[in-house]
Image (cartoon, grey):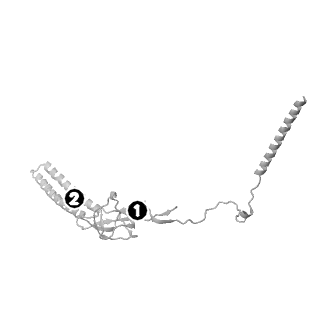
Amino acid sequence: MKQYSFRFFFVVVLLGSLAVLTSCETKTEKKEEEKPFVINDSIAKIITIDTVQSHELEGNLELNGEVTFDQTSMLNVFSLTTGIAEEVKVQMGDYVQKGQVLATIRTNDLLDLQKELATNIAEANIAKKEYDVAKDLESKGINSQKEVLEAEQNLNKENADVEALKKELAVIGGDATGSVVYVHSPIAGYVVERHVNPNQNVDKADQNQGIDPLFVISDLKNVWVMANVY
C-alpha cells in the first residue's frame, strides 16, 4: 500500500508542476503581446504624427503631349481625279464655309468627260429630231405607233446618258465647259491639315494606296489632349 501511495503522490506533484509551468509561459506570451510599440529617439526626431483625414488630392503631374482635333468630327478631302494642282486657295488654320473652293486641279479626266458629254448631247439632239419626225409621220398616218415608241425610247436613253455624264462631272468638281476641277469643302470648319501645294501632282483618291488627303477639315468644337503617361 505504501508503494502505491508514493507513486500516486509523485504523479500528482508532476502534473501540478507542468500546469504551473504552462501557466507561466502563457502569462509571459500575453505580456509580450501586450507590450506597446516604442519609437527610438533617432526616428522620433524626423517624423510627425497626425490624425488621418479625407481631402482632395493636391499637386501637379507634368506630362508631355499635344492638343489635337477631335478625330470623330473631321473629314478628309481627297481628289477624285488625277492631275496637277493649279491653285491652292486656303492655308492651315483658315476657316472655310461648306462648299467653298479649296483648290483647283487641271486634269485630262475632265477633258475626256467633256468630249464624251458633247458627243452624247449631239446624239440626244439627233434622237430628238428622229422622234419629232416619227410623231409627225404618225399624225399623217404614215408611221405606226410602234415606230414612235422606238424613237421615244432611243431619245430617253440618250438624254439619260447626258444627265449621267453631267452628274459625274459635278461629282469630281467640273462642268461641261470649264478647264479645271474644283475641290470644295464638304463641311464648315477649320483647315487643320494641308498636303498639297501649287503645281504639285495629285492622284485620284484610293484608300488602298494610302494616299494622304489634300485637306483635313474639322469644326474644332471639341479638341483632344493626347498625353504620354509613362
Residue nearer the viewer, 118 or 143 = 118
Where in the figure is residue 24, as x and y percent of width and height? 81, 46
- Compared to 8, does 199 lie above or below? below
CA neighbours of label 1 inside 10 A, class few (<14), some (14 to 19), many (20+): some
Q: Quadrant of residue 155?
A: bottom left
Q: Residue at x 33, y 57 (%)?
A: 208
The residue pinned by badge 2 equals 162
CA neighbours of label 2 inside 10 A, class few (<14), some (14 to 19), many (20+): many
For the residue marked with disc 1, what is the amino acid?
Met
Q: Which of the image's four quarters has the N terminus?
A: top right
Numbered disc 1: secondary structure: strand
Alpha-carbon span between mark 1 and mark 2:
35 Å
For the residue marked with disc 2, what is the amino acid?
Val
Where in the figure is residue 44, as x and y percent of width and height? 73, 63
Question: Contact (CB < 8 A) between labels 1 and 2?
Answer: no
Residue 74 numbered mark, or none: 1
Left or right, residue 139 beside residue 229: left
Numbered disc 2: secondary structure: helix
Where in the figure is residue 199, as x and y percent of width and height? 29, 70
Residue nearer the viewer, 189 or 29 = 29
Q: Residue at x 20, y 60 (%)?
A: 116
Where in the figure is residue 115, as x and y percent of width and height? 20, 62
